[in-house]
Amino acid sequence: MQGKVLIVDDMEINREILTEILQDDYSIITAEDGEQALEILSEFQGEIKIVLLDLVMPKMDGFAVLETMKERAMLGKIPVLVITGEDSVETERRCFDYGVSDFIKKPFDFALVQRRVKNIVELFLHKNELERLVKVQTDTLKQQYQQLQVQKEKLEETNEKIIEVLGTVVEYRNLESGMHIQRVKSFTKIMAEHIQRDYPEYGLTDHQVDVIVSASALHDVGKICIPDSVLLKPGKLTAEEFECMKSHTTKGSEIIDDIDDAWDEEYMKASYEIARYHHERYNGRGYPDGLAGEEIPISAQIVSIADVYDALVTERVYKKAFSKEETFRMIMAGECGVFSPKLLACFEKARAEFEEMADKLK
Amino acid sequence: MTVQECYETLGEDFNEVLSRLMKPELVKRFLLKFEKGTEFDELEKALAEKRYEDAFRYAHNMKGVGLNLGLSRFQKSSDTLCESLRHGEPTVDIEPLVEDVRQNYRQVVEAIGKLD
């Protein structure tokens, strides 16, 4: 099927000459003024390949037609050739500003008008096709990106879920620590954010902080392997029982190792470090591996101070609760094992936040 | 009278028109169309009624047809009149300009009337 050409000119003789020139290649529609032109454009929008537009017309002139075509976003899709009888640079500029493709100047020349129309129609076909292709590709990319986002979110959920389920198991098993995990998580968050702010050398990102906070719920996961007689014993443990109790660190890291491929590596690494090393101490006097200084992963260092703080400030089967003031003093004095100076500096700064949280989660 | 003779009578360049419009019979058809058109009468009427915007548009159209049909004298007098009307009511006496257009128009119409 031939494409349609819309010729807009108030002079019949001009419409006739242009029709004569173009009728072999296109099916011609003509309009006598701007209003008619716009009606035809609305009706045949997809079929019109090009508009030949006179400027000086009654009722609605060529500029008004251009204005409306611009408003209706037609100018990028349908090329417009302006028919003009004058050599006014200003008029040409104004037309080009609207997005007009080119001009047909009077007097009309058969061959020139044919070629000019053909060139611009083909150019726009090509342009419109390219734009369509780009849009298809962009849409596909957008869809794929959205799918990836959904999958990423699902993965995050899975990671969180694994930690939550395991954490709950520990809570059930370790009768005394109903709120313990929640509190350790909250203290961990306070510490981690201070470390992130004050010690950029650890390179903690917001995401890593989230992972550490989340993984702190698993610090005591190994306790599900400790017999009740030891775990729930109210009095002082014998040396043998204490060794058994200490093994919750290594047992915990083994459990996490076994989960293996089921979750994200970042979550797994943090959980492993925290479960195994949260009883290590900065001076190398902790357990199970006797790591010292910065050998102890920062994740485990952060959780260790959070864990100790909670153990001191709450009542346990083997001890009464210490006051917040006493707890603070004992940690700063190294009475519950030595922490890194950086950690203590942050802890000192965060004292008020710790105490507020301790009251809140009593 | 042939189309070519018609242009010669008017002192116009037939070959220039033919090179653009390709066929003598097309040139003839458009000339006859022009003769039948009412635009010139509309121009006179608009001027008489002082509708200068309309008059500008008709003069502009006369100029355009003159260009397309290679009627250079008619086109030039129309152009001069057109420019004097571009900004609405003219500031000079346009009657001599109108008379020029009128004369050129009559010459053209007369020559067209003699076509075979």
Image: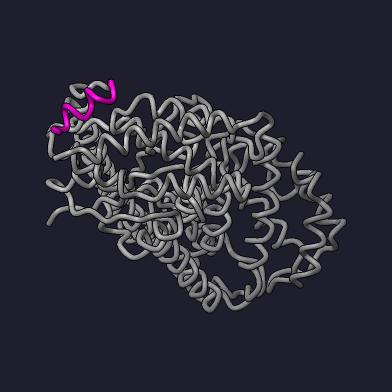
Residue A21 seen: yes
Image coordinates for residue B40, horizontal then vertical, percent:
43, 44
- Residue nearer the viewer, A216 or A74: A74
Query: Is residue A229 depicted above or below A112 in this figure?
Result: below
- Residue nearer the viewer, A261 or A88: A88
Image coordinates for residue A5, horizontal then vertical, percent:
26, 50
Image quarter of the N terminus of chain A: bottom left
Image coordinates for residue A289, horizontal then vertical, percent:
48, 44
Q: Which residues are magenta?
A: B1-11
- Residue sitting at the far right: A325
- Residue nearer the viewer, A104 or A142: A104
Instruction: Name the magenta segment's main secondary structure.
Output: helix
- Magenta includes A230? no
Query: Is residue A186 depicted above or below A19 in this figure?
Result: below
- Residue nearer the viewer, A120 or A257: A120
The residue lying at 28 percent from left, 25 percent from top is B10
Query: Is residue A315 depicted above or below B99 in this figure?
Result: below
Image coordinates for residue A255, horizontal then vertical, percent:
39, 61
Q: Would residue B100 appear left or right of A20 to someone viewing this image? A: right
Q: Would residue A340 appear left or right of A67 to someone viewing this image? A: right
- Magenta includes B4? yes
Query: Is residue A139 depicted above or below B4 in this figure?
Result: below
The residue lying at 41 percent from left, 47 percent from top is A75
Q: How many tags in the picture?
A: 0
Image quarter of the C terminus of chain A: bottom right
Q: How is the image coloured?
A: one colour
